[in-house]
Image: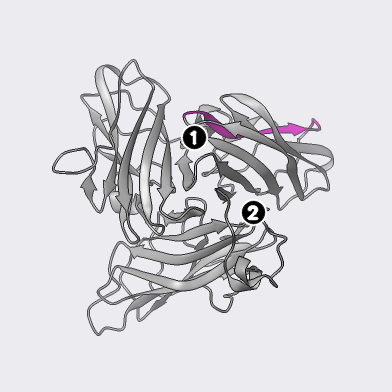
């Protein structure tokens, strides 16, 4: 099946040095480990698209290359001179579960180097196995070696001490089936980090009838993995927990995870936002595909571009960390997908009302093309309580974008459904 990975850079490439970033949390760094994520499934990467807000400039260039296990692949694009966008639809590269992957940038032209802008980057992952999709992150923030650390499963960010800030909500029915983890350095003799999945606040460690999802990295080891079957349903809340034992070295941990959908072609397009939403003003966030650096009053700074393969998003799920208010107070928060700074007719929207902390839209659908900018808008009513939020929709990627809408049995663009591949 196909999964389209979309993201916009949190930090830009360097004008003068080579940099690296993860596929699903694009924050460029001159240290390769800090921009490299473990990959949790086997398949093929293709259809690399890079769009930037600033052209490199006359005589300048910036090359983006998919890098696997520390080696540049053939999947690459170069933006030169006045280019704002380039794509590689010619090359495809294979990747295996347990490999590492990054986006590698190389500036050209000398002097002050190219203008780097803010790149929007997308590519397609075609899994070898029906229903499989991948998630993960790379971060520059060390784990605490004295308290529990939390992060997202479907969309990660910096490790933090508060589980609810890092959580992701489930939209697509299926099972988590694998975790892969890498440390920047070994924990040290007699020390370890234990990584596991938290499901609705319960550690999945094999005790009390829970599924054992633990990955233990101890002593001189720097990597670990686990396979399992952890069933998930829409509305479940998941996060990762990394717990230190004894006094391990405080180091960076990068994680990759794998999900097996009950319905082939479905994956999770998820986002979590670290800061609290305004209680009086409209808030905007990226529509998914990356950790959000914060709700913002400016919509133009919170939109992510679609990829070469059209996608549809459906069955939106939203979870707030705090309910808006008391019963009959009228306090609420309404979340709606935005496309190109507008709310299309029939776009998914969900209202978290009064004492509830969650809401969903199980019927509406939005289609996102490579020319579209996807965002999320939140509108508070009657001054709701301060809260964070996470949201996820089912993503279905079409691998037959040229099929006309006149074939209703195939679900044309106007019908809000697409054909996946398996």
Element at label 2 = loop
**Disc number for residue 62:** none
**First-in-chain label (2 vs 1):** 1
Q: In the orientation shown, which residue stands out farthest toward the front?
A: 409
Q: Which mark is residue 399?
A: 2
* Residue 419 in picture, x, y percent from top left: 59, 59
Magenta stretch secondary structure, dominant = strand
Residue pointed to by mark 1: 39
Q: How is the image coloured?
A: one colour
Image: 367 above or below 265? below
Closest to the observer, 88 or 404: 404
Residue depth check, mark 2 versus mark 1: number of the one nearer the observer: 2
Q: CA distance from mark 2 to mark 1?
A: 22 Å
Name the quadrant containing residue 382: bottom left
Please provide the residue range marked out in magenta: 98-111
Residue drawn at (58%, 30%), measured in percent from left and top? 30
| 68 or 296: nearer the viewer | 68
- Side of 416 relative to 329 (left or right): right
Q: Farthest residue toward the right? A: 58
């Amino acid at each position: 099946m196909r999964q389209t990975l979309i993201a916009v850079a949190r930090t830009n490439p360097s004008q003068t040095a080579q940099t690296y970033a993860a596929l699903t949390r694009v924050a460029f760094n001159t240290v390769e480990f800090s921009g490299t994520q473990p990959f949790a499934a086997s398949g093929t990467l293709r259809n690399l698209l890079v769009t930037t807000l600033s052209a490199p400039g006359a005589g300048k260039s910036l090359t983006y290359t998919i890098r696997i296990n520390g080696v540049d692949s053939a999947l690459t694009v170069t933006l030169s001179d006045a280019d704002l966008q380039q794509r590689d639809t010619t090359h495809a590269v294979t990747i295996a579960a347990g490999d590492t992957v990054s986006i590698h940038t190389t500036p050209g032209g000398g002097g002050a180097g190219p203008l780097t802008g803010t790149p929007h980057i997308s590519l397609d992952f075609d899994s070898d196995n029906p229903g499989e999709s991948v998630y993960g992150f790379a971060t520059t923030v060390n784990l605490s070696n004295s308290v529990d650390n939390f992060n997202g499963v479907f969309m990660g960010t910096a490790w933090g001490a508060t589980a609810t800030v890092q959580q992701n909500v489930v939209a697509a029915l299926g099972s988590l089936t694998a975790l892969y983890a890498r440390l920047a350095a070994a924990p040290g003799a007699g020390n370890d980090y234990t990584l596991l999945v938290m499901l609705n606040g319960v550690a999945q460690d094999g005790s009390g009838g829970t599924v054992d999802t633990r990955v233990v990295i101890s002593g001189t080891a720097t990597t670990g993995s686990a396979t399992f079957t952890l069933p998930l349903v829409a509305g479940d809340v998941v996060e990762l927990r990394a717990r230190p034992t004894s006094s391990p070295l405080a180091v960076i941990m990068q994680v990759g995870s794998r999900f097996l959908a009950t319905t082939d072609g479905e994956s999770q397009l998820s986002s979590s936002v670290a800061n609290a939403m305004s209680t009086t003003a409209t808030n905007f966030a990226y529509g998914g595909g990356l950790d959000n650096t914060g709700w913002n009053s400016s919509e133009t700074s919170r939109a992510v571009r679609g990829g070469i393969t059209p996608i549809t998003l459906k069955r939106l799920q939203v979870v707030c960390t705090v309910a808006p208010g008391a019963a009959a107070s009228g306090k609420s928060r309404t979340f709606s997908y935005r496309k190109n700074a507008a709310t299309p007719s029939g776009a998914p929207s969900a209202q978290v009302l009064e004492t509830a902390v969650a809401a969903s839209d199980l019927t509406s659908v939005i289609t996102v093309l490579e020319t579209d900018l996807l965002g999320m808008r939140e509108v508070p009513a009657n001054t709701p309580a301060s809260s964070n939020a996470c949201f996820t929709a089912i993503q279905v990627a079409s691998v037959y974008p040229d099929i006309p809408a006149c074939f209703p049995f195939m679900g044309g663009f106007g019908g809000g459904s697409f054909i996946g591949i398996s």
